Amino acid sequence: MSAALSTETQSAAALAAIGRFTRVVLQSGVLAAIWVAADFVARNLALPVPGGVIGLVALLALLFCGGIAPRWVKAGADWLLSDMLLFFIPAAVAAVQYGGLFMEDGWRLALVVVAGTLMVMVAVAFAVDRAARLERRLALRRALVARHAVRA
């Protein structure tokens, strides 16, 4: 009896893992499709803004207006964010090819990298703070509505 239960538990766990994997692949594909579409638009309209930025703005607009529910892209976004360091390896390898540039203008490049990193950190901190405040406000509003519904 316990062997059959163990096999059923393993089968259920395997199916759950396959479901999670499929969800991550599909959601990452949705995010990639948004990027490809935005890159296509940026190239064909000769926009001075990279396709990735346009895609980010488009995704943000879709999330805010309800065109895409956050749960439709959350698992894929979490996976991409968790493995983000892997996406910087090609840039680091390409940078090694430009040794002369680093010898001449290395301090300028370092200054730009440090300043850019600090600006990104400040922007992320601001965005996280605003998102946390919004979530707290929404949770409070939900609690008040639930309390009011119970009394009515």
Image (cartoon, helix red, strand yellow):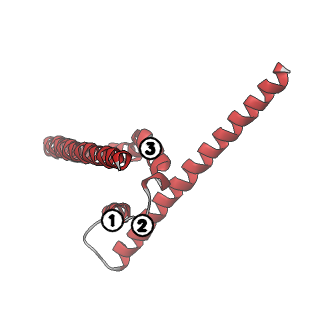
Residue type at mark 1?
Ala
Q: Which residue is drawn at 70% across and 40% down?
A: 15
Residue nearer the viewer, 141 or 22:
141
The kind of residue tagged 2 is: Gly
Q: Position of residue 74 (x, y in %)?
A: 45, 49
Above or below, comparing residue 106 to residue 3 in the picture: below
The x, y position of residue 21, in whole percent, is 60, 44
Q: What residue type is labelled 3?
A: Asp
Left or right of residue 118, residue 80 in this image: right
Please name which of the two marks, 2 or 1, marks the residue nearer to the observer.
2
| Nearer-N-terminus badge (1/3) | 1
Instruction: Please tell me whether residue 36 is drawn above or below residue 128 in the rendered image.
Output: below
* The image quarter in which residue 51 lies: bottom left
Q: Quadrant of the N terminus?
A: top right
Q: Along the horizontal axis of the image, is 119 left or right of 37?
A: left
Q: In the rendering, at what x and y percent does residue 39 appear? A: 39, 68
Residue carrying label 3: 78
Cα distance, mark 1 to mark 3?
A: 19 Å
